[in-house]
Image (cartoon, rainbow, N blue to C red):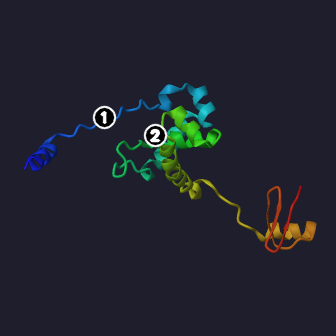
Amino acid sequence: MDELEDFEALLNTPVRRVQRPLRDRLNPLTAYDDVGFFDRYRMDKVAFGELLTLIEPKLSVNSKNTNRPLSALQQLSLALYWFADSGKQRSVGDCLKFHQSTVSKYLPIVTDAIASLAPDFIRFPSPSTETQSHFLDYCGLPSILSWNHRWYSNTYHIPWW
């Protein structure tokens, strides 16, 4: 009978959880001046703000899977720092006070959000018959699509150095 009472007492004992300390995460817009910001992120604060406005709806900040999700500003800042720096997740995490696994988690999300803007900002030239006929007359190469440091052909590839 003593064992049952001990077990009931154990069940009724409140569990103390150790509260993890919140990290004071860096806000790059206020932490750096214009030159320092450009040096770290390869863009000015205005362009950063415009990009944040464009991709913010695509960045989820719901807290289903994490205790303390990152804001859209923090997500974008860690991704742009990673793009501009050496590409090492641990060094980005150390500089911005995130864990490497947090950087790893949010990088593909932000990258996909930025890449989804490509159709609005990147225009590839459409192959015209004038360009193709120019290459045929000039070089004798049929089906050339465009010129960009190399020759691209529908049938074969000739490197141009």
Q: Residue at x 49, y 31 (%)?
A: 29
Q: Position of residue 137 (x, y in %)?
A: 91, 69
Residue 43 visible? The answer is: no
Between residue 154 and residue 84, name the one nearer to us.
84
Image spot of residue 89 (x, y percent): 57, 42
Q: Residue furthest left?
A: 1
Left or right of residue 140, residue 17 in this image: left
> Percent x, y for residue 86?
65, 40
Residue under the image location 37 percent in, 32 percent down:
22
Amino acid beneath label 1: Gln
Question: Could you tell me which quadrant the C terminus lies in?
Answer: bottom right
Q: Position of residue 71 (x, y in %)?
A: 41, 42
149 or 21, nearer to the observer: 21
Dot 2: element: helix
Q: Earlier in the sequence, mark 1 or mark 2?
A: 1
Residue on which the image places disc 2: 73
**Circle 2 Cα neighbour tier, 10 Å, few/some/many (<14 / 14–19 / ≥20):** some
Q: Quadrant of residue 147?
A: bottom right
* Numbered mark located on residue 19 in the image: 1
